[in-house]
Image (spheres, rainbow, N blue to C red):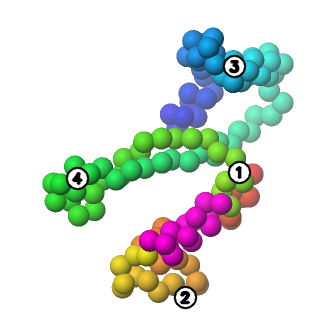
Amino acid sequence: RLVDRAARDVAWLHATLKATAASDPFTRRLLEISRAVHEEGEAQGAKLGILRSDYMLHAPALERGDADGALLQVELNTIASSFGALAALVSRMHATVAPPPAEALAPSAEGNPPPACPPNANLESLPDAL
């Protein structure tokens, strides 16, 4: 909700990025496009944000004896919808390159990756969203 609200608050977004746009041609061009679109008026009300969150394992949690550690979000990016297909393949690669513990190596009856590797339903969910 936070990212969605920030993206929809055009006045705040333009004010926040003004200093960056002064020295960064890419950001300046994005703001020019945004202003033109908002002056013209939106053609449709529907919006879809496709985001990727990046996490890293927080080492101090391991030092405290927490066997699972703690995953902390370090980045949030917008991505192209085509990235979803790649992410599904990367999930399969992770199951192969960094296999889970021996007891979880066998794929499920449906042929899905082992339970220790989270399922990735991007190929099904992204087209549904679009």
Q: Could you tell me how far apart the alpha carbons at marks 2 and 3 are, in whole angstroms?
A: 52 Å
Crowding near the residue tagged with mark 1, few <14, some 14–19, many ≥20 C-alpha atoms within 10 Å: some
Can you identify the residue that label 1 sits on? 81
Q: Main secondary structure of the magenta part?
A: helix
Foreground tag (4 vs 2): 4
Q: Earlier in the sequence, mark 1 or mark 4?
A: 4
Q: Could you tell me how far apart the alpha carbons at marks 1 and 3 are, in whole angstroms?
A: 25 Å
Q: Residue at x 84, y 30 (%)?
A: 43
SS category of the residue bearing label 3: helix
Foreground tag (2 vs 3): 3
Crowding near the residue tagged with mark 3, few <14, some 14–19, many ≥20 C-alpha atoms within 10 Å: few
Q: Position of residue 113 (x, y in %)?
A: 52, 77
Foreground tag (4 vs 3): 3
Is 92 in the magenta?
A: yes
Q: Residue at x 36, y 84 (%)?
A: 102
Can you identify the residue that label 3 sits on? 25
